[in-house]
Amino acid sequence: MGSTKEIQTRMKSIQDTMKITNAMYMISSSKMQKAKRILSDTEPYYYNMQAAISRILRHMPDTEHPFFSIRHKIAEEDRKIGCIVVTGDKGMAGAYNHNILKLAEEHIQNDKNAKLYVIGEIGRHYFQQKKIPIAHQFHYTIQNPTLSRARNISETLIDAYRTKKVDEIYLIYTSMKNAMTEEAQFMRLLPLERPDFMIKDIPVDLPMEHIAMKPSPEAVMGQIVPDYIVGYIYSALVEAYASEQNARLMAMQAAADNASAILQELGTLYNRARQAAITQEITEVIAGAKAQKKGKN
């Protein structure tokens, strides 16, 4: 057990740390609420694009488009895979970045044709340190997801897909399962899969609308799908941002709880040390008084 001064110094240090963790907790909480509002505002756009594609495929099932075309002529092991990895810009977010990077490595380590598209400073530094080639770095802060940035990212990816630099594109990001937990996701972005747009349990008596598409269904699809990809990427960026803030919030809460427990333990040690010091002083006073009394006798 240390001296009372040493214990007080440790307690002061922990209290200062708690001020920082509490401030970060409040900031993360505010940012997470903002991200959730943005996500709820943009989800209708994403779902409307999805509904439009579903409507076209339901009424014109024979519609063909490169965005739905799996390149069967290329052997599966020879297909060039593009992976968009969305990480954070900062640490102190628990296992948030670790889980994303671990999932990304699992999918690219055994694939010689994998190309990395990285968003976020943590991911960029990690892959550079590991000497893993990065096909394209998006130098955007993940702290401010916008539709403009999502559109730029989408244009880069769609161009790579159209020019056959990649045959498949996957998105690796973190989504929130509920208010308390988040989960790393590995989702295929391109080519799109028709079953994902098929409406289940369609009523038998649902009338078929007559739809005319000018100049052609393929041309209309060529306009709608890029907007859908933009919406998908934007939703992923916002959800990843909200997940990062949630992870940091939980980490700061855990740090504050641990600090409180340590403070309580140190408080007990301080009281014991102080009581021992008082007892020692009383003992010394009594011993001194006895010695003085014996001297007089």
Image (tube, rainbow, N blue to C red):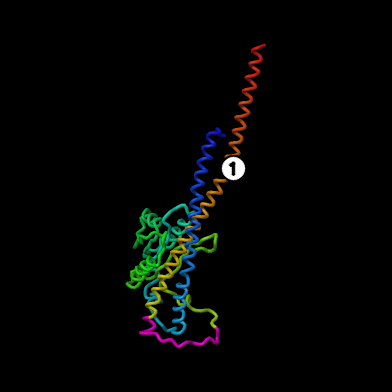
Q: Is residue 244 above or below residue 74?
A: above
Q: Is residue 160 left or right of residue 291?
A: left
Q: Which residue is most to the top?
A: 297
Q: Is residue 141 above or below residue 257?
A: below
Residue under the point 51% across and 37% down: 9
Q: Nearer the viewer, residue 239 or 72?
A: 239
Locate residue 125: give its quadrant: bottom left
Locate residue 148: give its quadrant: bottom left
Q: Nearer the viewer, residue 180 or 15?
A: 15
- Disc 1: CA contacts within 10 A as few (<14), some (14-19) or many (>=20): few
The magenta span reads: 203-219
Q: Amino acid at mark 1?
A: Gln
Q: Position of residue 171 (x, y in %)?
A: 43, 66
Q: Where does the N terminus fall, quadrant-wise? A: top right
Residue under the point 65% across and 12% down: 296
Residue under the point 57% across and 39% down: 266
Residue under the point 46% across and 84% down: 59
Q: Where does the C terminus fall, quadrant-wise? A: top right
Q: Give the structural element (helix, strand or loop) at label 1.
A: helix
User: Residue 145: within the magenta?
Assistant: no
Q: Position of residue 245 (x, y in %)?
A: 48, 57
Q: Nearer the viewer, residue 124 or 74?
A: 124
The residue singled out by tag 1 in the image is 264
